[in-house]
């Protein structure tokens, strides 16, 4: 996606990839309203809106007593995310006195988009991601004759297990299950059959039609992963640009999916990054000179300045929600609840953000 944005701004881009083969990983992302604003800048939002159900409402359902309450949701239909890249290599030059970095092919800027275990982020000084004690299973279920969920986002909760589902189309449903980690997760994650079996086992006592949804899911779509996050204070205390190297997406702001903002925040990164680089490019066009290292650093500094506080607040809210759900200590849980009430009283304020024009 970032390459697509930069192409639209006339910026030549080469994608560096460790894998020797084409690959597509992950199940889905949820695009929040702020993500749709970024997609509007790409010129593809209108087309995408025609391909999926628009989520109009949300309900939180307690399995034990059947009680329901409304969930605040915006327009956020899920989107498939596929990553296909070409193989390149990256050389790190620690002794360089100017930028300290240079691609093997002579490119001037390196953007680390290499996920939660980012090599680039580590070299920039960001601490390693941390783990919640919760795992998440994601998958898709196809209903040949159509499903019964309409256009609602539903969450079913029982003890430490939650299932959320979002209709993608009239026949396809995306769902996720969160539960406590187990000692078998490492083994289970390697087999879709074991993932399905462990998920069904964890959901004992859930409504029959919800359990059937998991049982009938597309086996190839199932993924079991840990919930990793970057501590919000690490973002504030780290210079996210060194020379002409920076990070974007999960490499910059890995966060658990409690706000469903990881994908949308990454779309924002792409728009802001391309805008900063292209503005820098136009400053030099009259002189018809190549951008100097100082020009590029200034552009990346502007990008980091625009993004740091935005992703800090997203990461902080996600961290507080995750810690509240994760902890067994009443005092910690109460502190998280109070912090959320004080700092994030408006539960959907994060979806109103506008990353600006491309």
Image (cartoon, helix red, strand yellow):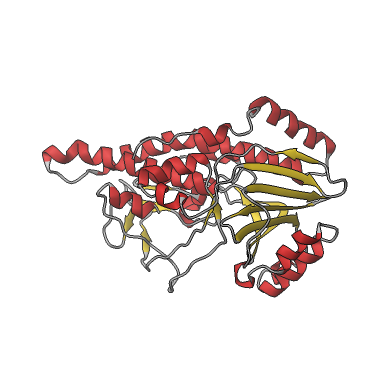
User: Given the current orientation, which residue lies at the most extreme left position?
Assistant: 287
**Which residue is drawn at the image coordinates 65% and 72% (left, top)?**
190
Q: Is residue 56 visible?
A: yes
Left or right of 112 on screen, residue 327: right
**Which residue is drawn at the image coordinates 52% and 39% (left, top)?**
311
Left or right of 268 on screen, residue 331: right
Q: Quadrant of the C terminus?
A: top left
Decide which of 310, 358 is in the foreground and name it.
Answer: 358
Q: Position of residue 348 (x, y in %)?
A: 60, 34
Quadrant assignment, res 342: top right
**Which residue is drawn at the image coordinates 49% and 66% (left, top)?**
24
Decide which of 327, 149 is in the foreground and name it.
Answer: 149
User: Given the current orientation, which residue lies at the most extreme front position?
Assistant: 145
Left or right of 253 on screen, residue 300: left
Decide which of 266, 75 is in the foreground and name it.
Answer: 75
User: Given the current orientation, which residue lies at the most extreme top position?
Assistant: 342
Q: Position of residue 25 (x, y in %)?
A: 53, 65
Q: Position of residue 174 (x, y in %)?
A: 62, 58
Q: Position of residue 40 (x, y in %)?
A: 39, 43
Q: Is residue 242 visible?
A: no
Whether residue 73 is situated above or below residue 202 in the rendered picture: above
Quadrant assignment, res 84: bottom left
**Which residue is drawn at the image coordinates 42% and 42% (left, top)?**
38
Whether residue 172 is situated above or below residue 314 in the rendered picture: below
Whether residue 289 is situated above or below residue 113 in the rendered picture: above
């Amino acid at each position: 996606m970032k390459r697509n944005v930069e192409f639209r701004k006339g910026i030549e881009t080469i994608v560096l990839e460790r894998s020797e083969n084409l690959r597509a990983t992950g199940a889905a992302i949820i695009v929040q309203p702020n993500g749709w604003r970024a997609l509007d800048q790409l010129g593809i939002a209108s087309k995408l809106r025609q391909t999926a159900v628009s989520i109009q409402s949300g309900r939180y359902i307690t399995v034990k007593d059947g009680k329901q309450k409304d969930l605040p949701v915006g327009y956020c239909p899920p989107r498939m995310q596929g990553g296909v890249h070409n193989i390149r290599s990256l050389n790190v030059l620690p002794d360089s006195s100017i930028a300290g970095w240079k691609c093997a092919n002579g490119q001037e800027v390196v953007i680390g988009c290499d996920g939660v275990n980012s090599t680039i982020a580590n070299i920039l000084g960001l601490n390693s991601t941390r783990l919640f004690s919760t795992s998440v299973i994601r998958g898709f279920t196809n209903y040949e004759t159509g499903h019964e969920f309409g256009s609602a986002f539903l969450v079913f909760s029982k003890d430490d297990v939650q299932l959320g589902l979002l209709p993608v189309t009239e026949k396809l449903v995306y769902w996720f299950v969160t539960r406590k980690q187990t000692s078998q997760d490492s083994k289970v994650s390697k087999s879709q059959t074991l993932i399905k079996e462990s998920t069904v086992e964890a959901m004992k006592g859930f409504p029959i039609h919800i359990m059937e949804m998991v049982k009938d899911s597309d086996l190839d779509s199932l993924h079991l992963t840990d919930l990793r996050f970057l501590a919000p204070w690490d973002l504030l205390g780290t210079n996210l640009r060194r020379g002409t190297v920076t990070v974007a997406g999960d490499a910059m702001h890995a966060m658990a999916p409690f706000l469903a903002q990881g994908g949308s925040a990454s779309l924002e990164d792409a728009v802001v990054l391309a805008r900063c680089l292209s503005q820098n490019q136009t400053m030099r066009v009259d002189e018809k000179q190549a951008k100097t290292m100082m020009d590029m650093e200034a552009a990346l500094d502007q990008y980091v300045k625009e993004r740091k506080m935005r992703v800090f607040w997203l990461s902080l809210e996600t961290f507080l929600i995750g810690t509240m759900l994760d902890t067994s200590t009443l005092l910690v849980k109460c502190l998280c609840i109070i912090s959320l009430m004080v700092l994030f009283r408006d539960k959907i304020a994060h979806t109103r953000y506008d990353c600006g024009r491309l």
